[in-house]
Amino acid sequence: MTTMVTTAEAPAGKLPVLVTFMEMAKRPGTPEWPMPEGVHGPVLARHCTLAYYRFLYDTIGEPWLWEIRRRMDQGELARMLADPQVEVHVIHVDGMPAGFVELDWRLLPADGTVAIDYLGLMPWAIGRGLGGWLLDWAVRRVWERPRVRRLTINTCSFDHPAALPLYQRAGFRRLRQERKFVDDPRRAGVLPLGAAPHIPLARPVPPAPPLAPAPDGAPPQAGDPSRRPMAFRPTAGSP
C-alpha cells in the first residue's frame, strides 16, 4: 500500500501528490463500448486555436488542478497545437462541448509510443458514462495505426478517484508511481483559490523578512546590489 504525505506535512506552499505512470503494450481484446445516447463525435479540432483549447483545458481541468498548460508559454502551446501530430478530439452533447481527449503521436516514428496526454469531461458531463466510452474510443483509434508498440497515460492523486480503476479496466498496467511535492497553483495565482475544494490548500509561504539596515544605520536602498533579493524561478513540472 502506498502512503501519502498529508498537506500539513508538506513544505509551505507545496502539495503532496502521487503520480501513477501507466502503459498498454498490446491491442485490447475487450468488446467495444457502445456510444452513449445523445453524444456526437469525437470531432478532431483541426487547427485548434489557443483560445478554444484553453476554454476546454481550463474548464475541464480546474476541478482537478490541471495547471501545466496554464503555466506553459502560450506561444509554445500554440505551436504545439499547430503540430499535426498532436490531436485534440472533442465530444458534444446537446450541441455543447462535453469533453476531449488529446493524443500525442510525436514519438511514434522514434519508438512506437503514443501518449494520451489529457482526457477529461466538462463538470456537467461527469457521471453519464462518457469517460469510459471516450477512453475506449481513443485506445482503439491509437491501435488502428501501424507501428504502434505502446500507449501511455498517467494519472495522479488530484484526479477523479475513478480514473485509475478505469484505466486499469481498459487494459493499462502500472509502470511506476512517483511521490513528490508540487507548488500549489492556487497559492501561486495560477488557479482560483476555490478550485479543487477536495484538495486542501497548501500552507501559505511565510512573508520574507524585511531587509536589514545598513551598518551605518541608513535604510537599505532598492538599488543596493549587496541587499537586493535574489530572483526566484518556480520549479517546472507537476501533474
Image (cartoon, rainbow, N blue to C red):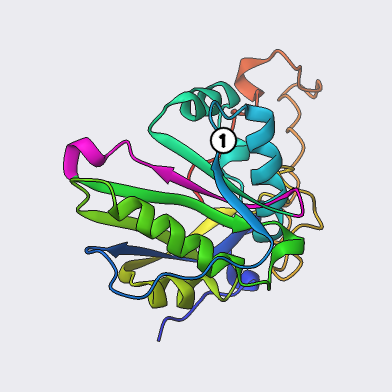
Residue 227 quadrant: top right
Residue 174 quadrant: bottom left
Residue 157 shows in this picture = no
Is 100 displayed left or right of 135 in the figure?
Answer: right
Q: Decide whether residue 23 is among the magenta residues.
A: no
Q: Using a 10 Å C-alpha cutoff, classify the residue at mark 1 as few (fewer than 14 neighbours), some (14 to 19) or many (20 or more).
A: some
Q: Residue at x 67, y 49 (%)?
A: 185
In the image, 85 versus 183, the foreground residue is 85
Say above or below: 25 vs 79. below
In the image, 95 versus 116, the foreground residue is 95
Q: Decide whether residue 100 is among the magenta residues.
A: yes
In the image, 60 versus 4, the foreground residue is 60
Q: Residue at x 76, y 17 (%)?
A: 221
Count numbered badges in the picture.
1
According to the picture, the residue beneath numbered tag 1 turns out to be 45
Residue 170 shows in this picture = yes
x and y percent of residue 71 in the render? 60, 37
Is 163 displayed left or right of 130 in the figure?
Answer: left
Q: Which residues are magenta?
A: 94-111
